[in-house]
Amino acid sequence: MISANPFGEFRKECKELLEKALDSLFPKASMPKIVFEFPPSLEFGELASSICFELAKKLGERPLELAKKIADAVSSKEFTLVGSVEAAGAGYINFHVNHGKFAELTFESARKLNSDYGFVQAEVQRKIIVEHTSVNPLHPIHIGQARNPVLGDTIARILRKCGHTVSTHYYVDDVGRQTAIVAYGYQKLGKPQPKGKPDHFIGNIYTITNCIIEIERLKKEIENAEETRLNEEVERLKRQLDEWTSIAAELKEKYPELFNKLLDEIKRDEDPEHVVNELNRNYEEGREKAKTIIREVAEQCLEGFRETLGRVEIFFDSWDWESEFVWRSHVKKTLEKLRETPYVFESGNVLEFDADKVAKDLNLKPALGLREDYEIPSLTLVRADGTTLYTTRDVAYSLWKLERAEKVINVIGMEQSLAQLQLKLALYALGYAEKAENLVHFAYNLVTLPGYKMASRKGRYITFDRVLDEAVERAYQEVSARSPQLSEEEKREIARFVGIGAVKYALVEVDPSKPVVFTWERVLNFERNSGPYIQYTHARACSILRKAARTPEKPEYKLLNQPIEREILLMISRFPEIFMDAVENLKPNLIAEYANLLADKFNTFYNALPVIRARPPELSDARLALVDAARIVLRNALEVIGIKAPRKM
RNA sequence: GGGCCCGUGGUCUAGUUUGGAUUAGGACGCUGGCCUGCGGAGCCGGAGGUCCUGGGUUCAAAUCCCAGCGGGCCCGCCA
């Protein structure tokens, strides 16, 4: 017999036993919901119920007395996976598994299901779009943004594993002032061939151009403010100017040639900002000249992104260009429909969306987790010059996605929570309540640097490429020191998956809602609690199986009675439940944490007990089955978070 | 000013949604052991804690509620 969820079978049996016992003992009493918890130690069994504390009040008995009665009643029933039931502590009912039977079920299930073990299929399989990464094509992906692809890719992987049809989408944000700025600089340089990696090259042009334009803009604003004698305003602007001037000095030192050339060229324009705005408007209108230049820049950036993401084996099914939604009138049509609702109004020359009124009229605040007295800020849909804003265009894009999938998960940093809320309310306003409910904002917290704040517009960031380079280099040094006998090619290969495994693990391991402070120490960890540690443990398990060179013919599972063996058994049996928990709550970190804990236990086992030379042979066979099952689960867990499980390293 | 997120030994982190066991799990760092054993990227041991604070609910609170405090983010005709 095998099961997709061995621990679930045990849990089910415990529940049935407890229900029957309660029913026969207290046929008339209304029972609290039966939930189980994990005892603090295996001495107290594998599952426990604290129902007696609650029942004691209702029935006027002591919890422990009740627990004893219930345990006795349960014990008179027939068991299959349950081994024994007892009352303990102040009133717990503890359920122990029958180790022999449970080990057989668990290890045989893991080994037979193999690469499918743990991945319990969803009851309803859906079409799901996961939009993630979507870094603007202006500069390289930096380490602050790298949490996004790693989380997004893992979410896509776990959803696929439970049978959903998942499509990963990258939203190319090529519309807007920022892309116009970089294209402007690129044009000023005479459309140069990139030196080095194209996204890095474009990133430098962007930062420098943006900086020069900002300085010009601030100088003009200060002149204006001085004329009207707004002293506070002047001070504020001067502080901003100071900051940009120091950024300019940094950039000039780092990239003197590029900086000076851009400065000379931009100075020729009377009003660079006006040229940029013009370019932006021409692009939205789909004029050929603007299209050629902006697409050229964006494509170069994306080429760099594909290379970086390819290194970490993250790929996309669809690249959705924001401009397409503008040019093909999706945005215009959506705006027209929004205008017909009572929630859009003009203010000055701009068009505003009253998100708060929608929430109030449809009574959505409680469902959205908002207080009634919280007033949701309105959203500007259209600028005075007639161009649209990012969130406006995102409404059209979201509708497009929701027409193609039953559920859409947007992996976007939590700093965009308000915009995502306004977007959702726009869908409600348009009458797409069901679609709005199928739109999920998967919000994750920021990655920060200990010294200063990363700011891509200011050119202050550590690129993802650099982090990957460092990690692979460190891994190369490690592998060279540990295994000098390997060929150069083998060392390079191992260094690659070890270094990248370390980085991915570090980014996926932490609860997405918690902030992460980036340190090299965190990412370049190859010891306990790291990707490489789990990879190493997997390789160790493979090594035992390789040396044994036999399949376990007649394992006697009840001989696996050492505490560490029972702990590993329990963990392997629970992998399917951990996976389901990770899927339902979109918490990929649970799988990383689980894999690390299983690796810990496996290493303890490895060190304490012999496998191949264990006697009698039936015990050796049972341990071999355990090792094989652990190997399978470690591999499955690593693969579902996108980390390679090597046989050797 | 308003909203959201986070707060757990020196540092990092699990547990908080669904409250439970005299001992709040891990890791790093510190420290003492284990290299003739199936891979030492390992194993075994030790020291180190106001679970941010104060109230409340409960037989039981790191977990739930209220009020604060600290840090981050957002409240733009940026994305």
Image (cartoon, rainbow, N blue to C red):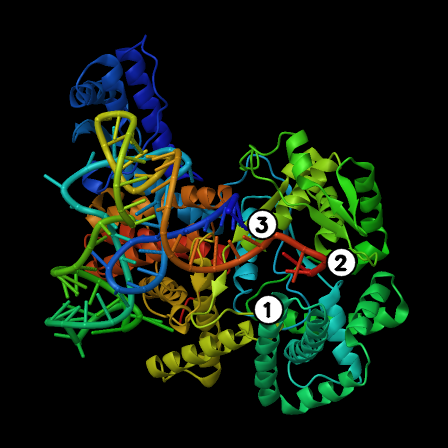
Amino acid type at circle 1 is Arg
| Secondary structure under the numbered disc 1 in the rendered image | helix
Disc number at residue A322? 2
Image quarter (top left, top right, bottom left or bottom right) of the N terminus of chain A? top left
The verdict on a common chain for dots 1 and 2 is yes
Pinpoint the chain carrying mark 2: A
Is A606 situated above or below A368? below
| Secondary structure under the numbered disc 3 in the rendered image | helix
* Residue A521 x, y percent position in the rendering: 38, 72
Residue in the foreground of this view, choosing between A425 and A71: A425
* Residue A477 x, y percent position in the rendering: 39, 82
Q: Label 1 belongs to which residue? A: A236
Residue in the foreground of this view, choosing between B17 and A388: A388
Is A118 situated above or below A64? below
Q: Label 3 belongs to which residue? A: A417
* Residue A311 x, y percent position in the rendering: 57, 71
- Residue drawn at x 88%, y 72% as measured from the top left: A289
Q: Is residue A645 shown left or right of residue A543? A: right
Q: In front: mark 1 or mark 2?
A: 1
Is A472 situated above or below A501? below
User: Mark 2 touching mark 3, by CB under 8 A?
Assistant: no
Amino acid type at circle 2 is Glu
The verdict on a common chain for dots 3 and 1 is yes
Pinpoint the chain carrying mark 1: A
> Residues under labels 2 and 3: Cα distance?
20 Å
